[in-house]
Amino acid sequence: MVKARTLVGLDVHAAKIVAAVLDVETGEVRSFRLPGDVGEAVGLCSGLARPVRATYEAGPTGYGLARALEQRGVSCLVCAPGKIPRAASDRVKTDRRDAEHLARLLLAGKLHAVRIPGPQEEALRDLVRAREDVRVDLMRARHRLSKLLLRHGLRFEDRAWTERHARWLATVELAQPAAQTTLIDYRGAVDALVHRRGELERAIIAAVPGSGWAELVGRLRCLRGIDTLSAVGLCCEIGDFARFARAGQVMSFVGLVPSEDSTGERRRLGSITKTGSRHARRLLVEAAWHYRNPPRLGRELAARQSGQPVEAVAISWSAQQRLHRTWRRMERRGKRRTVIAVAVARELAGFCWAIARTE
């Protein structure tokens, strides 16, 4: 990479952008306050002494600014906010100081870059996350409804949220008019969310063939417990698997590795770090529960593996054997099943990486 003449730290907000411009040769720092318009920031950076490198924190404003800067020939690094070094004694925080801090860290090479997705990739990721938001809302709406019925002494004895359960709900009438109105409202909220979830799932499945992940989704579906929605979710959250040199890096990226507090001769491992994408971590943990059962090739899994590379199918079978052994071994040691599922999910992330690396 060509050494930059000018470094720019950008503190980006919805309504304003504060830029700190650092001249590498003289060490001079100038600050600019701009409106929250991408064009203004791009115009400032592209008019500085070249070569120019800019940086800002990943956040809710997205990656449009980074793409616009790259189009104008300005190298841009979107940095991970959780990995920005900060002094414990630094108690003064302003937009100007934050922008200058970013510029100086960029000069020192202390910033960790976040992968910038393409517009199509980001749009599909938004769609996947919208479905995840609806899933969470649906779970909460169902909890409200079930707890309302429980407060009135009503309980469905069979499996909840099935067609039989829906028919039973339609027959429930509460004595108090206000309570009955609440019940009807809760039922309407659940029905609406179920409909929204179905529409989003159909849109996700329809978008896969036109995306750049169609082949990767097909290979990931060879794994037990991972179907189209899970595979698309992992692709959206992890992105390019090839940027990870080892399987352990993927495990760390999704926050499934143990935290550690070691010093001297003492080594202490704690709970998982839970860094990275919560959505990807949940998908892997949910898929891990399938490996509590002995290895087998069911009809649905065989259909998903049909036409896929032989290497991917072989890795899938190895995953079934290894992960089931891990589950059984930890069960014999008396570990809780929730802990076992997380441990299996960590290894499953490695198998996803291995399948993604096959051609």
Image: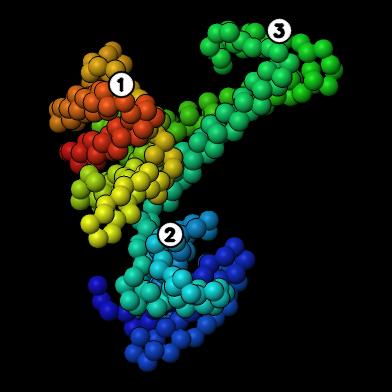
* First in residue order: circle 1 vs circle 2: 2
* First in residue order: circle 3 vs circle 1: 3
Q: Residues within 10 Å of mark 1 (few under 14, many from 20)?
A: some
Relative height, residue 158 to residue 330 (above, below)? above
**SS type, badge 3:** helix
Alpha-carbon span between mark 3 and mark 1? 38 Å
- Look at mark 2 in the image and give the residue it sits on: 82
Camera-side residue: 315 or 68?
315
Quarter in which the N terminus is drawn: bottom left
Provide residue 137's location: percent of width, then percent of height.
59, 33
- Look at mark 3 in the image and give the residue it sits on: 171
Camera-side residue: 121 or 246?
246
- Look at mark 1 in the image and give the residue it sits on: 292
Q: Which residue does the image show at 45% across and 76% down from the upper left?
A: 101
Alpha-carbon span between mark 1 and mark 2? 35 Å
Relative height, residue 326 to residue 249 (above, below)? above
Residue occupying the far bottom of the picture: 26
Provide residue 275's location: percent of width, then percent of height.
40, 49
